[in-house]
Amino acid sequence: MRRKFGLGIILLLILVLAACGEKSKEDVAGKLADNMEKMNGYKAQASMSLQTGEESQTYNIEVAHKKKDFYRVLLKNEKDEKGSQIILRNNDGVFVLTPALNKSFKFQSEWPNNSSQPYLYQSLVQDVLNDAESVFKATENYFVFETKTNYQNNNNLPFQEIYFDKKTYTPVMVKVLDKDKNPLVEVQFSAFEIDPEFTDDTFEIEKNMTSGVLGIPAMAEGTENKELAVLYPNVSLGSELVETKEIETENGKRVILTYEGEKNFTLVQEMANSFPASAAAPEKVNGEPVNLGFTMGALSAASIEWSYNGATYYLASDELTKEELVEVASSVTGQQVK
């Protein structure tokens, strides 16, 4: 009897010790917050796939962050290498740079603190801390949170699953979900380094506007006389194309598409003009940088502007909301009206 009793005690102790070893949601959230407070910065590499448009898009991403407000996010689109962009935040403001075009936007913006960012560690941690109703589970290798998101100009992505490594508490994978919990955006982290060394010019606009930083050549002036391929939105929100106007410019043709109906809007497109880097002054925008799926756009109260495949696009409307501007712009993917 004594032997059986002793064995039972041992088994009970094993079960108790195993239970004590499991981290609670509060334990993990507290550790994540503590890590963020202690680190001076990080570097990360990731790939991001999006299923939000007609075609899937894939970005290779490099992130550099230096405490407190210095960020450099390099976005390389596999289908538009020369359209690679850098989101930069330094003491001078927030910028979106397209080095191959020597084109840049400067924003009056609180980015990245005003919206969820699936490739930024501190944004993921903040989303965990902000959602008291988040769902938590621990697998063999990961701590997993399902949280609400905060995408100001996109209500179609309300949830996300965030996978943190159990040993390092660094992000491994993020799945951004639609209302039916289908993953539309997925970020896979391949490398994550805490407290790295940064060169003095890592976050300077002049250095990052050099095309060599991306390993690609700058576009030749005049954009090599490339012909403009006119693109049309697949989402027009109840409006129809009523007029197409072509204007000849020094840079080729400019096409103006006018849509009328439930929500009137105008879409202007032309080949991008490339200037010497020394002459490229940032275009100021009182708005936000937004991801359109295939490129970053500059969103203001009544318009949105972006570059893609050597062309520039400008969508304007006094009737579309900011979310609707992003929705229409995201659908300008190449299918022409028949």
Image (cartoon, grey):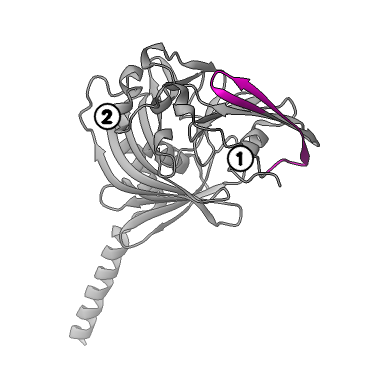
**In the image, which residues are magenta?**
235-255
Residue pushed farthest bottom?
A: 1
User: Which picture quadrant has residue 325?
Assistant: top right
Task: Give the camera-side residue of 229 and 170.
Answer: 229
Residue 106, image x, y percentages: 48, 19
**Which mark sits nearer the N-terminus, 2 or 1?**
2
The residue identified by callout 2 is 40
User: Residue 182, relative to residue 116: is it above or below?
Assistant: below
Identify the element where label 2 is drawn: loop
Residue at label 1? 332
Which label sits in the foreground, 2 or 1? 1
Judge whether 117 appears above or below 221 on screen.
Answer: below
Q: Outermost residue, right direction?
A: 261
User: As drawn, is 42 to the left or to the right of 227?
Assistant: left
Residue 258: horizontal and vertical position, in percent?
Answer: 74, 30
* x, y percent for residue 303: 64, 25
Mark 1 neighbour density, 10 Å: few (under 14) some (14–19) many (20 or more): many
Q: Is residue 336 magenta?
A: no
Residue 66 seen: no
Q: Nearer the viewer, residue 198 or 216?
A: 216
Residue in view at x 35 percent, y 29 percent: 72
Left or right: where 237 falls relative to 295: right
- The residue carrying pointer 2 sits among few (fewer than 14), some (14 to 19) or many (20 or more) residues within 10 Å by Cα, namely some
The quadrant of the image that shows the N terminus is bottom left
Which of the numbered marks, if any, corresponds to residue 270?
A: none
Q: Is residue 337 visible?
A: yes
Q: What SS does tag 1 mark?
A: loop
Query: Amino acid under label 1?
Result: Val
Question: Is residue 123 rendered to the left or right of residue 179?
Answer: left
Q: Amino acid at mark 2?
A: Asn
